[in-house]
Image (cartoon, grey):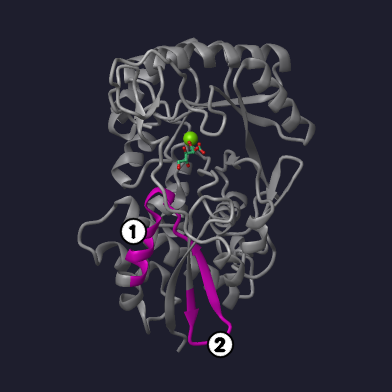
Amino acid sequence: MLSIRSVQAIVTAPQGINLVVVKIETSEPGLYGLGCATFTQRCLSVATAVEQYLAPLLAGRDPDRIEELWNLGMVHSYWRNGPVLNSAVSGVDMALWDIKAKCANMPLYQLLGGKVREGAAVYRWANGRDPRECEDRAREWIEQGVRHVRIQCGPNVGMPYGGLRLDRPEGALDGDYYDPADYMRRNLAALQHVRDKLGPEIELIHDIHERLRPADAVRFARELEPVRLFFLEDALAPEDIEWFANIRAASAVPLAMGELFVHPGEWMPLVSRRLIDFIRIHISAIGGLTPARKVAHIAEAFGVRTAWHGPFDVSPVGHAVSVHLDIASTNFGIQELFSPGFEGPLREVFPGCPEVRNGYLYASDRPGHGVDLDLTAAAKYPHQPGIDRWTQARLPDGTITRP
Ligand code: GCO
Ligand code: MG
């Protein structure tokens, strides 16, 4: 019987962003699987959870039993449904699906029911410091065949969430200050500008990134209606999801939520009460492909579409798993793809990155999810230590707030 021989967590940062990948080797020489366990802000905690707890638990077990091992991985810690342990289980889970597809000599999408489309339409980031820069960036994507662009206008185009106000109180503590009022004015103007300049065909998206108080989010969603967004992303923090009913009552803007979700109790009420239109979960944060495919099926029953989280802090392994699920899901909505995409060192460390052409992501037809990991190359880009500043977000008076 095939068995699990080793479970290893690899932390690598080919683009300077810490990624976590789990490699499961089996008793059959050369047969291994790779999974994404990336929670970049706490990557070493995830790696420790994999190697200190999951590796000894799984050694010698049957890799075919994915559902069994996913449930074991989730409940064995007793306390569960948190981002660190879920990410660790995700790395194992995706690696087991990779192994199963390799054993079946099939691309992963075949195990998920086969293709319902050839490629997954992507949305790309059009970040700018002013409306004109946002417009220019959007035009660059449109020239590459992209039909969905996310407009974010703010001084920090690298992490383009929130406005800026410089008049901090005396002695204010350091942090990443933003002014919700400035943010709303700035982004309403930018979205109106881009819609006016690019016309009605292009699909526009905007990410509030949980940075508004609920009442402001309700008002902003109403103000955004004339822009005709494809969807408004993360209008609320997970702690405030009861307010989605208020936004639904006030605005017809399609709503997308989920990248911060870790517990079924967060997404289930929004889906079952049809309070959102797109579920945008960070797949590793809920435990991997096994739960994500269940979320997709449940969402389909309620008319909610998928829009899996696709930032720079998902590894190419995770992106590949998303694409296989995208092309096999009837209720696929859109796939986020970070900028600049799978370039340079990322391709060196992860041979087989998904291909992007004319606004679509394509899944590999090789057995498994199609992405490999070059351990020698990975070692060239070791863990990047440091203290994130952008998640030390502060309101103008210096109050720490949600990033
Ligand atoms: C997105 C997200 C990211 C997150 C990042 C957190 O929509 O892609 O908002 O930009 O901020 O993944 O680490
Ligand atoms: Mg987001």
User: Which residue is at the far left?
Assistant: 78
Residue 87, can we see it? yes
Residue 228 found in image quarter? top right
Q: Is residue 374 above or below residue 161?
A: below
- Quarter in which the C terminus is drawn: top left
Of 171 and 382, the residue lying toward us? 171
Mark found first going from the N terminus, 2 or 1: 2
Which numbered dot is residue 31? none
Of 251 and 144, the residue lying toward us? 144
Q: What residue is shown with label 1?
A: 45
**Which residue range is magenta in the image?**
24-51
Which residue is painted at 42% across and 26% down in the image? 235
User: Which residue is at the far right?
Assistant: 143
Q: What residue is shown with label 2?
A: 29
Q: Amino acid at mark 1?
A: Ser
- Say what secondary structure mark 1 lies in: helix
Q: Rate crowding at label 2 as few (under 14), some (14 to 19) or many (20 or more) other CA atoms within 10 Å.
A: few
- Distance from label 2 to label 1 (Cα)? 30 Å
Q: Is residue 176 above or below residue 340?
A: above
Residue 350 found in image quarter? bottom right
Q: Position of residue 76 (x, y in %)?
A: 24, 67
Tell me if label 2 and label 1 are in contact, CB under 8 Å.
no
Q: Position of residue 163 (x, y in %)?
A: 47, 19
Q: Amino acid at mark 2?
A: Pro
Which residue is painted at 56% across and 80% down in the image? 31
Residue 156 among magenta residues = no
Which residue is painted at 54% across and 22% down in the image? 155
